[in-house]
Image: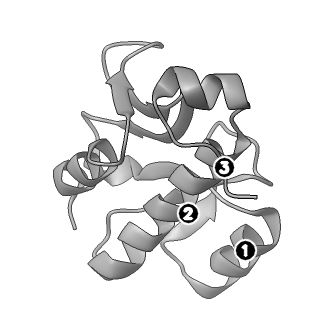
Amino acid sequence: MNRDELIEYCASKPRATRDFPFDDRTLTIRVGGKIFALLDVRDESSGVNLKCEPELAQDLRESYAAIKPGYHMNKEHWITVAFDGSLDDAFLRELVDRSYELVADSLTRAAREQAGLPPKAR
């Protein structure tokens, strides 16, 4: 999966929005106003930042050379995934799905309603 395919996959998530809040090259993809993916649209070698559970993030960084601590992000909760071709598409989609779900699940009930997301399962 290349950068453009990953952007389209992220954007296909329910109620995902895209914007450039920092500059004209740093794309953020959000759900409920909170970022779940962040990447440089001009530099494919920079990879994508995704939210991740701390324990899993550590395991992933130890297991895959293409996964590093989140660039310019909280290193405990974010990973940067390189577009180097070493990770298969299904695995990349799984990482995006986890990031999206972590962020969506962290939204308050009011934020979920405003974003048009269903209530959390109890």
Indicate whether 15 appears above or below 59.
above
Query: In front of the other: label 1 or label 2?
Result: 2
CB under 8 Å between discs 3 and 2: no
Alpha carbon of mark 3 to alpha carbon of mark 1: how far?
Answer: 22 Å
**SS of the residue at dot 1?**
helix
Picture coordinates of residue 106 (x, y %)? 72, 42
The quadrant holding residue 57 is bottom right
Q: Mark on residue 98?
A: 2
Indicate whether 97 appears above or below 91.
above
The residue that label 1 is drawn on is 56
Comes first in the chain, label 3 or label 2? 2
| Residue 48 seen | yes
The residue that label 3 is drawn on is 120
- Quadrant placement of the C terminus: bottom right
- Quadrant placement of the N terminus: bottom left
Kind of residue sitting beneath label 2: Arg
**Residue in front for this viewpoint, 29 or 113:** 113
**SS of the residue at dot 2?**
helix
Indicate whether 52 appears above or below 63.
above
Q: How crowded is mark 2: few (under 14 residues within 10 Å), some or many (20 or more)?
A: some
Which residue sits at x=32%, y=23%?
Answer: 25
Kind of residue sitting beneath label 3: Lys
Kind of residue sitting beneath label 1: Leu
Query: In front of the other: label 3 or label 1?
Result: 3
**SS of the residue at dot 3?**
loop
Picture coordinates of residue 112 (x, y %)? 59, 31
Indicate whether 111 appears above or below 50.
above
